[in-house]
Image (spheres, grey):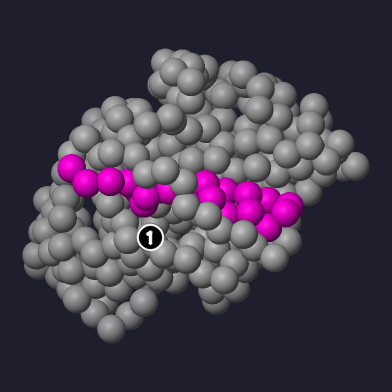
Amino acid sequence: MVRIRSLEPWTDPRGGQIERLLIDNGTLAIEVLSLGGIIRSLWAPDRDGERANLVLGCDSAEGYLTQDAYLGAIVGRYANRIANGQFNVGQTQYPLDTNQDSNCLHGGREGFHRQQWQLGTLPDGVRLSLRSPDGDMGFPGNCNVQLDYRLVGNNLYVEILASSDKPCPISLTQHSYFNLDASESSLDHQLQVDATQYLEMNNVGIPSAIRQTHGSGLDLSLPTQLQSLIGREELTTTSGIDHCFLMPSTESKLQRFGSLSSPLSGRSMTLYTNQPGVQVYGGNGLEGVVGKNQHRLNQYQGVCLEPQQIPDAPNQPHIAGDALIAPGEIYHHISRYQFENDA
């Protein structure tokens, strides 16, 4: 049985209130905010059956609105980077908000992570909805988004549907930072990845080539301690892992990406997704971000596994399509996060 209850809302300093819902199925529990579709907390049991929160977050609306790490949020209208903050549809060029070097990152400064979503309930979770107007951060078309978070046994399902009334690239992802033992660092975690290809990037994070993981510093076919990745040649410019792995074509079916695990707590999290790419970000830029209890986070304190369309796809369709959603088409993202322990 899934229990859902409202928590005391927060005041949005920009006006209005931010709703908060707690969803608990006895195994997993999540707290969801109407601000940014944020998962503020996610509790799962360790090898001793003790539940703890496994994601990084903030204690107030102000906390979320003043940090730039996208803690727990849904990011869009286009996750990751679009080069030079622009793309073309036919002969029409669309300039976007540039907020990271010369790029548009995660939809721009006022992307979906800062928007007020409509929040409602489902029998086993919550449903959020958002309308992004034509021209929002430069993106064309009125875009409607539906987001479901559902708890099924030891699984968190994230499902997103989106449409636009003008051709527009759409890529949405869940940007939670996971720390499976609630410690000050995730570097003792182990990461295993099934994908056999990744994107090589230039110095501002734009894809430049497809590379094979085999024989590289990003061959994670076996569980690999995150600490051991620091200093590998392919990761020096990003000060740790911040790379997009490519999934084989699945015709929209869920497939296994890999697993993050903590030997300390015995917890593991396995990700399944229908998206063509998964960005793995090791929290390389987290240092100094203010989290819960006004605690300043450490570099590498959490790990993001971000299922998404291919970075800069609108400008590089030769890599994996252009990610354009035409009027009448539906963008569909579904991911399953399976939590287990070695009890």
Residue range (magenta): 15-36
Which residue is painted at 46% across and 46% down in the image? Answer: 7
Question: Which residue is nearer to you in this view: 143 or 225?
Answer: 143
> Label 1 sits on what residue type?
Leu
Which residue is painted at 52% across and 47% down in the image? Answer: 31
Which residue is painted at 62% across and 21% down in the image? Answer: 185
Quadrant hosting residue 64:
top left
Q: Is residue 197 above or below residue 247?
A: above
Using the rendered image of the protein, determine whether residue 141 is visible from the camera's viewpoint: yes
Picture coordinates of residue 286, whole percent (x, y): 45, 23
Picture coordinates of residue 111, whole percent (x, y): 26, 47
SS under mark 1:
strand
Confirm whether the magenta stretch covers residue 28: yes
Quadrant hosting residue 46:
top right
Which residue is painted at 26% across and 77% down in the image? Answer: 326
Question: Which residue is nearer to you in this view: 104 or 28?
Answer: 28
Q: Is residue 273 above or below residue 58?
A: below
Answer with left or right where residue 65 lies relative to residue 55.
left
- Residue that sits furthest to the bottom in the current view: 328
Question: Which residue is nearer to you in this view: 309 or 47?
Answer: 47
Look at the image and tell me in which quarter the C terminus lies: top right
Quadrant hosting residue 14:
top left
